[in-house]
Amino acid sequence: MNNKVIKRRTKVHEHTIRAADGGLVKLRLTRKLAMSAFCTECLGFDDNPQSCTAPLCPLYPFRAKTLRTKKGNVKEGDE
């Protein structure tokens, strides 16, 4: 049996995004960081993406899970 461990390389892209102060900032973005940055901007830089209440957003299923959903207290579609 071959015990090789297959490591996935995380793709990183340099990209300029909007900062909370209205300026621009250049970041090295992974897919997860890019989604988090998008959600943070969408929420007006005031809330955490975990507090998203827009279930029709295409990124909603991929947002960071809340403590409530991690504990399994929420049924599918009840979020």
Image: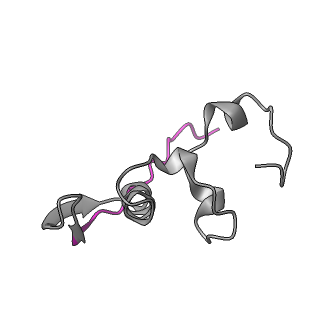
Residue most extreme to the top: 71
- Residue at the location (62% across, 71% down)? 58
- Report whether 44 appears left or right of 70: left
Q: How many marks?
A: 0
- Considering depth in this image, is 16 or 46 the residue closer to the camera? 46
Q: Position of residue 37 (x, y in %)?
A: 36, 59
Q: Closer to the camera, 16 or 49? A: 49
Q: Is residue 49 left or right of residue 26?
A: right
Query: What's the residue at 38%, 50% (across, down)?
Result: 46
Q: Quadrant of residue 57?
A: bottom right
Magenta region, mostly helix, strand or loop?
loop
Q: Could you say where residue 8 lies in the image, as x and y percent from the top left? A: 45, 53
Image quarter in which the N terminus is found: top right
The percent coordinates of residue 55 (x first, y second) are 69, 63
Residue 70 image-quadrant placement: top right
Give the residue drawn at x 56%, y 46%.
51
The span picked out in magenta is 1-16
Tell me what residue is drawn at x 44 percent, y 48 percent: 47
3 inside magenta stretch:
yes
Image check: 42 left or right of 55?
Answer: left
Taking depth in this image into account, of 21 and 69 the one nearest to the observer is 21
In the rendered image, residue 5 lying in the magenta stretch gets the answer yes
Task: Tell me where residue 34 sits by quadrant.
Answer: bottom left
